[in-house]
Amino acid sequence: TLPEARAFPPPDISLPPPWPFVLRVVVWRVRKCRLMDPITKQNDLFLTLRLSKVDRDGGVSYEERETDTHWRSKGGRASFNYRLLFPLSLPLDTATLTVQAWDRDVVGSNDAVGEGGYDLSKMLRSGYRRVR
């Protein structure tokens, strides 16, 4: 009946509000990197990090950051001590961090050295549950 329905209002089933987060990535070193210059056996190495996000509404966005260049890195090793920040709003459906290594060329285009991807979805979900 109508009086009983008014006595028990419906529960709120809306989605929780998004929480602002910051993903902090520290790049310290690169090891066992392929050498792109066979004559000098050196790379002018830098990294690009791209965060691909799919939010809960299905919207896709990308953010890209770049480290500085380790000039004349020898033996496939480079040191950076570089900190990168990616602002986020959690929860997200999926989040992937792609790391690309490049050999910088002053003249011409840069050479791709390698690439790796990391699925951050499980880690970000865990962080969101702890804060909520």
Image: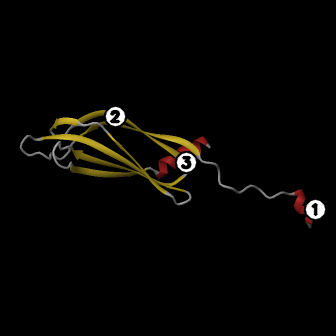
Numbered mark located on residue 90 in the image: 3
Q: What residue occupies the far bottom of the structure in this picture? A: 1
Q: Residues within 10 Å of mark 3 (few under 14, many from 20)?
A: many
The residue identified by callout 2 is 82
Q: CA distance from mark 1 to mark 3?
A: 40 Å
Q: CA distance from mark 2 to mark 1?
A: 64 Å
Q: Position of residue 118 (x, y in %)?
A: 38, 51
Tell me the kind of residue under disc 1. Pro
The numbered mark, 3 or 2, whose residue comes first in the sequence reads 2
In this rendering, position of residue 5 left or right of residue 57: right
Label 2 element class: strand
Q: Position of residue 14 (x, y in %)?
A: 69, 56
The numbered mark, 1 or 3, whose residue comes first in the sequence reads 1
The residue identified by callout 1 is 3
Q: CA distance from mark 3 to mark 2?
A: 25 Å
The one of 52 and 96 positioned closer to us in this rendering: 52
Task: Identify the image's colour scheme: rainbow, by chain, secondary structure or one colour.
Answer: secondary structure
